[in-house]
Amino acid sequence: MKIALLGYGKMGKVIERIALERSHEIVLKKDEFNTFDGLENADVAIDFSAPSIAVEYISTALNYGIPVISGTTGWLENYHQIEKLCNEKKAAFLYGSNFSLGVNLFFELNDYLAKMMAKFNDYKVSMEEIHHTQKLDKPSGTAISLANAIINHTDKNNWVIEKPKEDDVFIDVKRIDNIPGTHSVVYNSDVDFIEIKHVAHNREGFALGAVIAAEWIIGKKGVFSMKDVLELNSK
């Protein structure tokens, strides 16, 4: 499989190493200093760029008809634009706020717990999200996905990162050096609390999941998620 890396920062370099270990070829390492030359030779593009340029990078690949895996967060106000372009070009696109197998299982656990807790009003829900200081967006895309699942199954209406109201899900955002990613959800009452947490030890799980998603999407058309890759939609 020939892969174009759209974004060649820390994640891009880990993805490159894992892809090569799995006998794939890298035909483009796109960063701010080079062009898209070589993209036309790719079987799939993996985007881990930056919020300000993700739409441009993803759109360029889709215009070539190249399937795109995107793990860049912070640009989702333009998601429907990308979805429309993907369908127009009869291409394939998969966005994941997190590609880690463990995190995607954590998403399912969070979803199930939120459904159970919806009728127990004595418990107040809140979240904590910790990442390295180089992470540009806050809260993380993973935290937003977790919060939206809680909102879908409870009487909460919004998520906020400061000054929460009664109907808000408060996300306590922290930036600390050398923290790949920690997410926790707490339901607290006067008598006890229930907590679920995912702690990433390194970037390996994110990168491997992105490469596995790239392998999966070859030959497919449409807009997908990691639920499709991991066959979790029927759960």
Image (tube, helix red, strand yellow):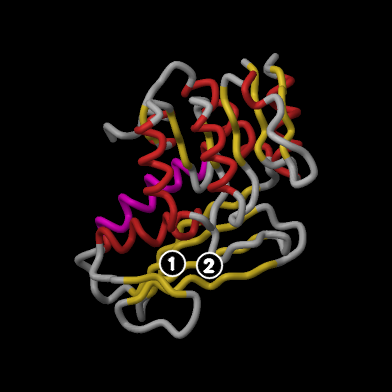
User: Mark 1 or mark 2: which comes first in sequence?
Assistant: 2
Residue in the image at 40% along x and 20% along y: 220
Q: Position of residue 8 (x, y in %)?
A: 74, 40
Taking the image as shown, residue 47 lies to the left or right of residue 203, namely left
Q: Position of residue 168 (x, y in %)?
A: 35, 76
Q: Amino acid at mark 2?
A: Glu
Q: Nearer the viewer, residue 134 or 194?
A: 134
Q: Which residues are magenta?
A: 102-116
Locate the N terminus and report the quarter of the image it occupies: top right
Instruction: Read off the residue under disc 1.
Output: 186
Taking the image as shown, residue 191 lies to the left or right of residue 210, namely left
Q: Is residue 168 above or below residue 128?
A: below
**Is residue 120 part of the magenta span, yes or no?**
no
Q: Nearer the viewer, mark 1 or mark 2?
A: 2
Q: Quadrant of residue 157?
A: bottom left
Q: Nearer the viewer, residue 183 or 48?
A: 48
Q: Amino acid at mark 1?
A: Val
